Image (cartoon, rainbow, N blue to C red):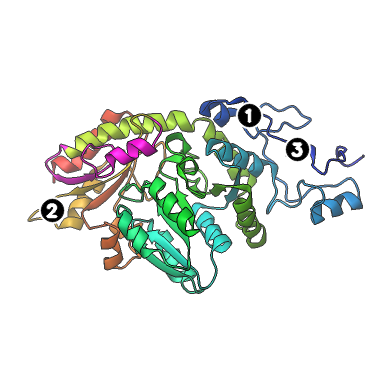
Amino acid sequence: MSQSQAHDDSGLDSNWRDDALDLELGYGMQTIAVRAGHHRTDEGEHSEAIFTTSSYVYTSASDAAAHFNGTKTGNVYSRHTNPSVRTFERRLAALENGERAVATASGMGAILTMCLAYLKAGDHLLAANQLFGSSIGLFNNYMAKFGVEVSYVDCYDNEAWANAVQPNTKVIYCESPSNPLAQICDIGYLSKLCKANHILLVVDNCFATPALQRPLDLGADVIIHSATKYLDGQGRVLGGALVGSDKLMQEAFTVVRSGGISMSPFNAWVFTKGLETLKLRMQAHCANANQVAQFLVNHPNVSKVHFSGLSDHPAHELVKRQHHMPEGYGAIMGFEVKASANRDATAAAWHIIDSTQMISITNNLGDAKTTITHPATTTHFRLTAEARAEAGVNDSLIRLSVGLEDVEDIIKDLARGLDSL
């Protein structure tokens, strides 16, 4: 075998064998985050390699044919099979207690893959009002264009969810926590509703991550991630993922293979390294966020704080049941500032944002660096005023993604604008 290593007769290439970390031994989350999914090459590398290759070499013409016709499982073409991407997929699936993950080029790519895999013309998609603006744009402008009926309900209103189900409802979609107000859906209730009506429950777990919440354990069918956020954790690269059963992920994989919504090997490697510290980072993010929320709720120029870690939050008890990390409520929050005679709501919010000296004014989140933005004029500006109102995005709202700086410095930076409002 002059061009590549020999293959056995099992129909499975050696690098596609079971995970190098035997997950049946019951390892903890941090061990899985550091070691799962890695298959060392003959070079014996300790750190995961980056496979920057578009294609693969076979031992013979018949070996190539076997890979392409599916009688042998192995690498075919990096649009849909790449070892670096596969390592990330396996590690994320293990962390989410899923059978399989499928990586995509971005978080929106993962949502598009979900739509193409599980919906067709004539189907009904039922979603929460409280969604990222681009998700609403995708559903309203494109899925509806191709014959998918879309409707929305308040994520907190279980009765509204049940009443909105139609005979053609195929997917219920929610973010929990949501963007930008960190609202919480009752995933257990939605799971029962979906199972009773043969509907797929899809939960965006981007803000919580498996470090805080595992929606599959709560009854969800598919998890969506914008890996760009906390899975990377340092704002370096774009990527997304879906996690679920082998059967559902095969449908998603087929979309990625045919549509080219592919994650690059380098980005996959970055995400794999990010997963190693995910739990540790989320603990630190949450600890900082809990203190920042207390500062905001007690500031006289803040009219409302949207953060499930506060005892008066409408879903405080629910999130304590759904999130498995003690005191882990996430690190994304919205807060509304008071207008004055000199400043309307938008001007007041912009004053707070513009007064910061350390915090990054950017629409990204889930970063080691604290970030701040005005959703009504950035992430949700393409929505109609009515749609923004339904999502709870008003002109006084500021979204804050609490980072890993010293929490005293984060609070001091926010106080600059709040104290001078």
Q: Nearer the viewer, residue 108 or 339?
A: 108
Residue at x 60%, y 57% (from the top left corner)? 261
Contact (CB < 8 A) between labels 2 and 1?
Answer: no
Distance from the alpha carbon under mark 2 to that under mark 1: 57 Å
Q: Tell me which label, 3 or 1, sits earlier in the chain.
A: 3
Q: Amino acid at mark 1?
A: Glu
Residue at x 62%, y 59% (from the top left corner)? 255
Quadrant location of residue 43? Answer: top right
Distance from the alpha carbon under mark 3 to that under mark 2: 60 Å
- Asked which secondary structure carries label 2, the reply is loop
Q: Amino acid at mark 2?
A: Ala
- In the displayed structure, does residue 252 sit left or right of residue 193? right
Q: Tell me which label, 2 or 1, sits earlier in the chain.
A: 1
Q: Nearer the viewer, mark 3 or mark 2?
A: 3
Q: Which residue is mark 2?
A: 339
- In the displayed structure, does residue 189 sit left or right of residue 413? right
Q: Which residues are magenta?
A: 298-325
Q: Which residue is mark 1?
A: 24
Q: Which residue is mark 3?
A: 15
Number of numbered labels in the structure image: 3
Q: Nearer the viewer, mark 2 or mark 1?
A: 1
Residue 162, visible in the rendered structure: yes
Does the segment drawn in magenta span residue 374? Answer: no
